[in-house]
Amino acid sequence: MVRLIDSNDVAFGRGLTNPQGLNRFQKALAAAERTPARIVFTGNSVFDGVSTDATTTPPDADMDLYGSAGVLRALFSRQFGAPMAGAIPAADTRWTLTGTGPASSGTTVSGPAGGKSRIMSNTAELSVTTPECTSIDLYHYANTGLGGFTYSIDGGAPVAVSGASPFGYVKTTIDGLAATTHTVEIVATADLCYFAGLEYHSGRGVIVAKYARSSWGLKDSYGTGISSSGASAGGRMRAKQGYAMGNPHLVTLGWVRNDWKGHVATPYTPTAYVADLEEIYGYVVAGGGCILITGEPDDRNNLAPLNGGPYTLDEFQNAAKTWAASKEHAAFMWVKEQWGTWAEGQALGLYRNGTDEIHPGAIGQGDVGRMIYQMLTGHHRYN
C-alpha cells in the first residue's frame, strides 16, 4: 500500500529522515527478547484511531486495537511471539469508575499521559480488566500535597502507594502474574490523587502505549493550546515531564496538523513550534529515549493557509523535518510522502470517506501502523 517509486523503500526504512536518530530505540529493540522496549505513542485524532469507523467515533478499546497504534502493537507482537503489550490510560472508557469520590475525566489534566489521566478524590475507585499479561506497571504523579492510592490485583489484598514522594512520575510494577487477564482496582486514599493509568506486558517484546488525544496539538498537551488552556506553570512542567514518564525508549509525536490549525487563533509560527519540540526533546533525551515525529497524511485544505493565516501545513511539517534532521536523537517520517496528495490517497481508499479532510479510514490506519513499523525495523544505523 505504501506508494514509492521503489517499492522496497519503506521496507528498508527509507522515507525516514535521520534514521540514526532512533539508535536508542534500535538498541532497546535488540534486547527486547529479554526486556521489553517501550514506545509512548502520542498524537491527535489521526493517531488516536477515531477514524477506524467510517461514520462514528468507535469506543476507546476499538480505537486502541484497530488504529495505527494497535496495528503497530500487533506487528511487534507477532515479531516476538509475545502477547500484545500496551496501555490503558486512566480516563479510557475501559475503566469503570465507582466509589463515593469523583474523578475528573482528564479534560483538565494536560500532558501526553495527562490528557487521559484522572485527578481522583478520596475513595474514588477505578477498576479494569487487562488483556493477557504477566506484568503490570501503574503510573501516577507524586508531589507534596498529592494523594495516594491502593491497588489490588485479582481481588488480592490492597497495597498502598504514596502520592507525596518520590517527586515526579512514579512507576509501580507488579511482576510474576499468571499469563492471563487480570482485574485491577485502584482506590484513592486522599484527594488530589493524580493517576495516569497502567501498562501491561509479558516481560518481552515491545510495549506500544498509546496516549493520543483527539482535537489536541502539542501545545494542548501541556495546557496552552486552543482545546486545553490555562494550565499553571507547575501544570505545564508536569505535563512536559510526562513525555518522559517511565523513561520510554521512543516517543512518537503526531501533533503537527493541529498545531498548524491552531496558529491562526493563537499566534504560533513554525519557529515557535520547533522551540516547543526542542523542550520536549530535552525531557525525552534526558530519560534515555528518542523521538519520532509522525507527520500526518495530506490535508485537503492544505493548498491555502487556514482561515487567512500566514502558514500552510507543509511549512509546519517541513520545519519539524528540518529540526529532526539536526538532532542526535530524533527522526521524522511523513505519511503524505508515502500516500501523495489528498486526491491520490483518496483514490486509493486510504481516507475515512470522500469528504474527510485528513483522517485515515480503517485501511489507512492499518497502512500507517505498518508504515511506522517498517520505519522502525527497516534499518540498523547507529551513527
Image: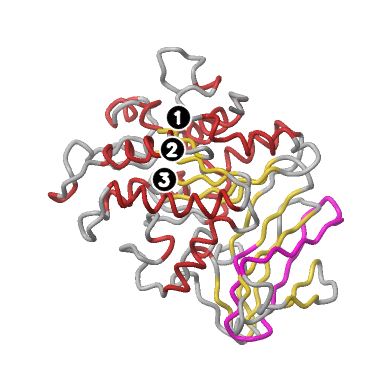
Residue type for callout 1:
Thr
Quadrant where the C terminus sits is: top right
Instruction: Say which residue label 2 marks.
Output: 324
Disc 3 to disc 1, how far (Cα)? 21 Å
For label 1, the crowd category at 10 Å Cα-Cα, with few meaning under 14, some 14 to 19 and many 20 or more, is: many
User: Residue 82: percent from the left, percent from the top?
Assistant: 76, 39
The figure's colour scheme reads secondary structure
Disc 3 to disc 2, how far (Cα)? 21 Å
Residue 273 vertical position relative to residue 168 in the rendered view, above or below: above
Nearer to us: label 3 or label 1: 1
Q: Which mark is residue 60?
A: none
Q: Earlier in the sequence, mark 3 or mark 1?
A: 1
Q: Is residue 203 left or right of residue 217?
A: right
Instruction: Say which residue label 3 marks.
Output: 46
Whether tag 1 and tag 2 are in contact, CB under 8 A, the answer is yes
For label 3, the crowd category at 10 Å Cα-Cα, with few meaning under 14, some 14 to 19 and many 20 or more, is: many
Residue type for callout 2:
Ala
